[in-house]
Amino acid sequence: VQPGVFLWGIDSRRGRVEWTKKLPGVMGYVRGNSDGAYYVSDNGSVLKLSPDRGEFRWQIRLEGRVLTPPILKRGLLYVSTERRKSGWTGSGIYCIDVAKGKLLWKTKIASARVSKFLRGKDLGVIDDRGKLVVFDKDSGKKVVDLKLPFGAPPRSLHGAAVGNRAFVFTNDVDNNGFMWLVDLEKKRLIATANALDAPVASMTPAAKMVFLDGADGSLYAYRLDRSQRPKRRSVPPEEHARELIARARRVRGPLDGLAIKLAGLGKKALGATEGALSEAHANIVQAAAKAIAMLQSRRSAAVLMRALKARLASPPSEDIDPVISIVDALAEIRATRAVKPLTALMKDETQVHTRRRAAYVALGAIGTGAALSPIWAFRATKQVNTLRWAPSPYTLSNKFMVDEDVTNDVPPEDLKRTTTRTVQNKAGQTYTAALSPYLGGYNDVWVGKSDLAGTLERPIFTGLTKAELVPGRRIKIGKVSVGKRDLTLQISMRSGKKWVRSRPVKLSLAQLLKDRDGDGLSDIVERRLRLCVTHPDCDGDGVKDSEDVNPLASSKIKLTRDMRLFREAFFAFYGFIKRRGIVVVDPGDGPSFELYGRQDPILSLRRSSIERLRKEAGLHAADFVSFGGPYPEGSGSGDALPKVVYDAKSRTARIGMDIVRSGNNGVGYNVWLKQQGKNWIVTNMKRVWRAVPDPEDLPKSLSPKKGPGAAAKGTAQR
């Protein structure tokens, strides 16, 4: 059955049905006058029907969904729609001349919740940001445009006007009801009063009274006088801010609405908001930093810079880092005075990679010559296409979350004991066998001559491994013996609570070192990396595979605009990560292109090759990176748009970037970029989704202290 709305035309004198029509939509609104009926469907269709037979006279199609009743006054029909498109949510406002069936004017408002009212024949609109606008009936030009200090977004919002006075009712998320009286002629707020602490269905103003139709079915009448001044307004802004912060200390988790409440108190509350930047509660710091950025005060930059200096020595928290919240706020206000401390933070290798990356992105957002200069210098030191083949033959950490770093150069002693074994042969030579995730598998075995402490002189990849198809399914090295020309290895795999030994494997030392193409990489390594075994330069760019950061992507490829964006996003993420190991990149349907920011190989592989590599090594120790369009607001993994989103002039762009190791170990980012001359600069990075391993899948001694579950969406942190 097709959905539709039935409309009956009834003779009011005789009570007789004259005609019946089935109209489009699931829900609709009807307005009428002596010329006919005007039907507005929820899908945006507007129809005029003749009064005698219900015949169609004209039809207009509007963009968006109609969720509130239209207004008909003196031959003009005003309709508001909710509009959603990529990267934008708001409302469309339309004025229709019903006599001619002509759209007189239309406009957009960057808010999905609006309330319409009439001031004479002009249209007034109030949105949930506190923006009050009156549009001229003929041209749609703004006659009145002012901002009311709502603070928290209202859940119930209504507007009305009598003469030059406008009344606005709001009921916020804390159930506080307010009435706002506005002088439309002088374009200023006259008074604010306490009102019903509950949502209302509608509001009707009279000469001296305002009537509220409560959601509970009762009718409430209000008269604005001095006795109804709001209690909140009698509290000094700074004191009120302290009360909000004190209540927030008792809340665990996100503090939705706190930032806008603090910002709504204005500059007089800046002192209390600045004090909140030193709170131990990371969510309070994040809200305070956002509020200071919203204020756009002359003091905002100085306040944030003082807080940044005080916070730099503190260790980062697990989920929300206060330092990053403050840096984000400096980026939001484009604080040119903060270039020097942000540059120092970006260069400080003692800081965690997330903080350094946040400073890098903030400098790009500020965008002045002084801010971009350290970015160019940093990129010049990192954007090299050659490397010195020096693999890491040890397991430095078993924490394999993709957005965490490993800063130590040597494995911890307890981890070294379980992942290495050092022996001496009859000739007195010392050899060490070690497990290393450098080539993508935690169970990959490496060997080489070493000292008694187990430090390898020249690590050799044996090719011996056990695919870690399930996270945490690790092996340990058992018996190791080395002869003149060969070595014997035995590994053990955990089965339940016991370790089960496999059969010993005998390997030829000469075979392990065999390099048929003479490029400096053994044939075994090249097979793992999917390189050419018989050709020293697999991508033909003139750089040997053992010295090529991108051995499967040629520098001769002409980069498209999208490729340049992907390359900058990759650099912003990896340019500050010290963690060793290969990175696997999916180039999509286009040709492979070079990426920078790593000191280890970046492999550009197609999906089929990646899947084969997963089966061989497990790939729980290598990052798998892919690019595409951005994630819409509120979406999660798998919801990214298929293409990059550019602005109208193609000067700014948004992309999506995924970094995944396994199904429950990945992260997705939205990345904003801006063109600066011939280059693109990252101006914002926001984590859209994150998946973390189940603690049961990790080695017991390495399980996270607290895991947010299999997946956590929308954490607003870089």
Image: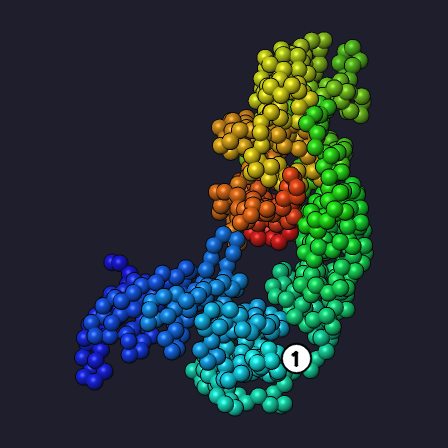
- Residue 53 position, x and y percent, is 20, 72
Picture layout, residue 280 above or below residue 471: below
Q: Is residue 557 above or below residue 25?
A: above
Q: Which of 67 and 255 is in front in this view?
A: 67
In depth, the one of 623 and 7 nearer the eye is 7
Residue 232 falls left or right of residue 371? left
Image x and y of residue 189, in percent: 61, 79
**Total marks placed:** 1
Judge from the rendering whether residue 361 lies leftward or rightward of residue 4; answer left or right: right
The answer to whether residue 67 of the structure is visible from this angle is no
User: Is the residue 283 above or below the residue 665 in the image?
Assistant: below
Q: Is mark 1 on a helix, strand or loop?
A: helix
- The amino acid type of the residue labelled 1 equals Arg
Left or right of 4? Residue 306 is right
Answer few, some or many: residues within 10 Å of disc 1's Cα (few below 14, many 20 plus, some between 14 and 19): few
- Find residue 550 and report its horizontal and vertical position in percent: 63, 27
Q: Which residue lies furthest to the top in this view?
A: 484
Of 664 and 596, the residue lying toward us: 596
Residue at point 37% right, 70% down? 97
What is the quadrant of the N terminus in the image? Answer: bottom left
Residue 148 percent coordinates (x, y):
60, 74
**Residue topped by disc 1:** 232
Applied colour scheme: rainbow
